[in-house]
Amino acid sequence: GSGGGGRPRDPEKGLSLEEQRVRRKRALLAAQQQARDAIAKRAKQQAKAGPTPVYVSDEHNGALVNLHRAIRCREIGFSGLGMFHVDSHPDLCVPVDMSASVVFRPRELHQALSNSETGIAEFILPAVYAGHVARVAWVRPPWSNQIRDGSHDLTVGSLPGAPEGDRGPLRVATALPYFADEGMSAPAIALEHVQPMALWVGECDAAPTDAMPEDWVLDICLDYFSVNNPFRNDLESKLDANLVALIAEVFCGSGLGWRALEEKRTQCTDDEEVERLRPDQAQQRTAFEQAMEKLLVAAERGEGDGAAFAALSACYDERGLAFATHFADWIREQPKQMIEVVRSCGPNLDLPHHRSDAEAIAAMIKALECKLMEIKRERGAAGRPRIVTIAKSSSDEFDYTPKDQIGTLLEQVLGMLERLYGTLEVEEDVDDASSSAPEGEAAA
């Protein structure tokens, strides 16, 4: 019948075998031409897009300066952006005391981050709060585990400020210990002017190809491939390796009660359990910090430290206590200058520290290139980042990327980008002071 429910007519019915063969060959040739036309169209689109902008900065907060500039120059959209963040560190801290209103005064924001000791780790969430970035994929190396792998839905907002005045500081509504344990979290109900953020965390090979929206930033820190802990380096320049390892065990080892709880909470997927363990961890951490400070003060003054050591001993399991006892015997004999170095560096020895050799670096760059090629192949035009930001993460004060590896790493990363995206337009070290707000931002 002629109704819509009838079987479709066979187009080859009644044709001879030769006519069928010719028909199929023509269809194949037409399909091949269609594929060639699609490839040519994509190549034309990419050529029309021009060179890929690549901004290189010394410190990672320079990436925010460059993002603002790219938005202002319309190299990338204003809102709903993604950031493919390749780094040994999450860089998802917030300036805990800074008014959220500063986010909409970019020159002041850039200066605040430059002046902050942790400004290099505080550049992403201001971009989220401003409404620019909505999705972040933190691609981490195997040695980094500050946030558990998987997908996390976060809410970034500000605490209430003074009436008719600036907004309160930024906070994140989440149970993740990375935020909660450093005073960066708050209940969603307490936040104003909120912005959602979809966060994915994992190693390179596991990164989903659809993690990024159409407009996205490829953000690479060179310390992803090889990373220093500058606090450990400082100690290693003054002490032998065995003593540095001892201090690391005393301040950050699994034999220390609150650190063991921290690891358990970081990897736990049950938010209620994470929150249930939080007060116990906080109490144990405070007890440790107070006991350690009393021990260090007693050592500086050459006084007896029996009570301080007894309090400190209660913070460890049997294995950890052996390290603490050895440490106490050693610190009592040290001059004030060394005690101050230990006080400053000890709590930070849990930061990533992994110097990679040339072979390991080459393998990591190859793996990243394969993942980015996969994204490019599957996403078409949306598989190419609008801009690329690269941070050397090395300065006079802190060298997170080993200085002797920076030149080679940068050359290899730029080579990878050229193979992936063709011609690059590379610009180094944008002057923060010349940066201004993206159009429309002040009204956000």
Image: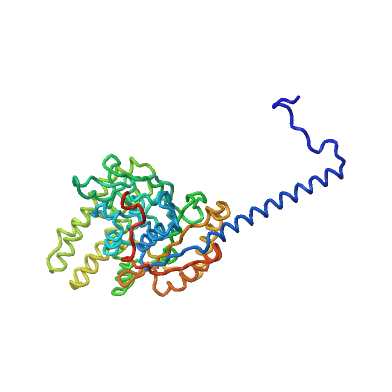
Q: Nearer the viewer, residue 276 or 113?
A: 113
Residue 331 lies, in percent from the top left, at: 21, 68
Q: Quadrant of the N terminus?
A: top right
Q: How many marks?
A: 0
Q: Is residue 240 placed above or below 115 in the rendered structure?
A: below
Residue shown at the point (19%, 69%) measured from the top left: 332
Residue 53 lies, in percent from the top left, at: 47, 63
Q: Nearer the viewer, residue 214 or 139?
A: 214
Residue 51 lies, in percent from the top left, at: 51, 64
Q: Nearer the viewer, residue 15 or 49?
A: 49
Is residue 250 in view? no
Q: Nearer the viewer, residue 300 or 43?
A: 43
Residue shown at the point (33%, 66%) measured from the top left: 434
Is residue 280 in view? yes
Q: Is residue 443 placed above or below 65 in the rendered structure?
A: above
Is 339 on the left or on the right of 85, as rendered?
left
Residue 161 lies, in percent from the top left, at: 21, 47
